[in-house]
Image (cartoon, helix red, strand yellow):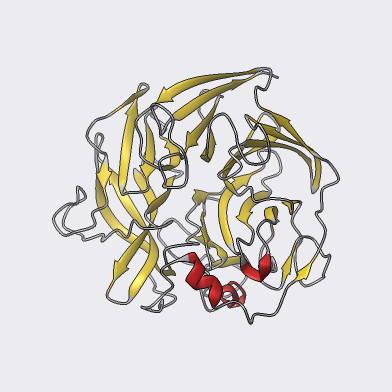
């Protein structure tokens, strides 16, 4: 485990305070949206059956399925919950404690920082789980040097887990913009999204791990074919990336990213990107798709109003993107870098939907789509039974 960046002990304690420090920043180059199709709103989409699979969760963030049929879901306040045969175990599979003595993972003090957007976030399963039964988790923690994010590895013990090792530490952390999605790619490497914690120029600093997509091996080492020698950085120039998904046929990596929420007077410009090795995605120098050779433009972007996108997955030849404020499950049909159509499923308009906030979308081993609501995260309006995991059967 390598600590790559020491986060300042003092950081902004509210978005308004953070934004006040940005008033003298140079305005970015603003480009148009790259897609040439309009969003279609489908509050009750035809051909989709919605079932409630799990209820009673608190701010679920990530859902993963194990090869033996079990499933795990993270809750941002610090719990991993176990699901067996469609039933949620009452006792947590793992607890990330906020005070000494409260952990279920052994003697290692995890010291969770569960405030703002911080807490327990992404989960990933070792690609060789049958012989290497490891679960990976990314979370925000507070240490003597301030707030940071890190990735730890747990060992599966059936009904619970024990702490194994820190895989990556020293990732900048704060109340906001922690990124937090982790996933294994088709190459067997672990990818992680990190936010720039409202320190915009961090996204352009290759010595810092904030505002990046990172790539490490399952033990936490740096792959020899990473673009920057000795560094886990795979791509940079990101604001607050939240989702990762590989195309099932081409293995192309797609990513979702939150656009500005007040910086430079902007409040939208959320993105879907194709991630290329070693490339710069422009934040905070550019927003939108200005076609500047130094930067990679998004393939989809929404300048009109905040979406913002979260977890995502490919399912039946389409990319399904969970969204938060816009309360939609966005379905994009894509041909390479060209967006053919955009449908906002379960959305009544740009600002509200029938399911509320959606944090993650995952294809299950049964060939159905699973989505996590996020109405108990402090920004939503909880419905009865929230938060939930919903199971979607989507026709051809």
- Residue 282 pos. (x, y %): 70, 69
Q: Does residue 245 appear to the left or right of 216 in the view shown?
A: right
- Residue 214 pos. (x, y %): 53, 63
Identify the image quadrant of the N terminus. bottom left
Q: Nearer the viewer, residue 45 or 242?
A: 45
Q: Residue at x 27, y 39 (%)?
A: 93
Q: Does residue 125 appear to the left or right of 335 in the view shown?
A: left
Q: Nearer the viewer, residue 352 or 172?
A: 352
Query: Image height check: is 204 above or below 395?
Result: below
Identify the image quadrant of the C terminus. top right
From where the camera sits, is residue 197 visible? no
Q: Nearer the viewer, residue 144 or 232?
A: 144
Q: Residue at x 44, y 72 (%)?
A: 12
Query: Image height check: is 38 above or below 274?
Result: above
Q: Does residue 275 appear to the left or right of 364 in the view shown?
A: right
From where the camera sits, is residue 51 visible? yes
Q: Residue at x 34, y 43 (%)?
A: 133
Query: Image height check: is 138 above or below 20?
Result: above
């Amino acid at each position: 485990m390598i600590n790559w960046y020491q986060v300042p002990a003092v950081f902004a304690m509210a978005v308004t305070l953070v934004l006040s420090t940005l008033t003298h920043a140079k305005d970015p180059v603003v480009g148009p949206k790259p897609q040439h199709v309009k969003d279609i709103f489908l509050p009750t989409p035809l051909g989709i059956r919605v079932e409630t699979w799990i209820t009673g969760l608190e701010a679920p963030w990530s859902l993963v399925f194990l090869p033996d049929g079990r499933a795990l879901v993270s809750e941002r306040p610090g719990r991993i919950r176990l699901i067996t045969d469609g039933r949620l175990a009452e006792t947590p599979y793992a607890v990330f404690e906020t005070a000494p003595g409260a952990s279920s993972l052994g003697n290692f003090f995890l010291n969770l920082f569960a405030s703002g957007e911080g807490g327990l976030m992404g989960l990933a399963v070792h690609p060789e789980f049958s012989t290497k039964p490891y679960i990976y988790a990314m979370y925000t923690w507070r240490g003597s040097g301030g707030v940071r994010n890190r990735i730890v590895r747990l060992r599966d013990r059936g009904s619970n887990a024990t702490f194994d090792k820190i895989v990556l530490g020293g990732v900048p952390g704060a109340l906001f913009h922690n990124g937090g999605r982790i996933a294994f790619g088709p190459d067997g490497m672990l990818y992680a999204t990190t936010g720039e914690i409202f320190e915009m120029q961090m996204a352009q600093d290759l010595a810092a791990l904030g505002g990046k997509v990172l790539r490490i091996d399952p033990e936490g080492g740096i792959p020899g074919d990473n673009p920057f020698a000795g560094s886990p950085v795979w791509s940079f120039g990101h604001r607050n990336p939240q989702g990762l998904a590989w195309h099932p046929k081409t293995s192309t990596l797609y990513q979702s990213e939150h656009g500005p929420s007040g910086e430079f007077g902007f409040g939208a410009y959320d993105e879907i990107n194709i991630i290329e090795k070693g490339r710069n995605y422009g934040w905070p120098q550019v927003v939108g798709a200005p076609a500047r050779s130094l930067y990679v433009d998004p393939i989809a972007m929404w300048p009109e109003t905040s979406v913002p996108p979260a977890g995502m997955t490919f399912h039946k030849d389409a990319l399904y993107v969970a969204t938060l404020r816009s309360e939609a499950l966005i379905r994009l049909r894509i041909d390479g870098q060209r967006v053919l159509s955009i449908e906002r499923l379960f959305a009544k308009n740009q600002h509200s939907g029938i399911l509320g906030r959606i944090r993650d979308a995952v294809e299950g081993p049964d060939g159905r789509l699973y989505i996590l609501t996020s109405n108990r995260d402090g920004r939503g309006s909880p419905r009865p039974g929230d938060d939930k995991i919903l199971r979607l059967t989507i026709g051809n």
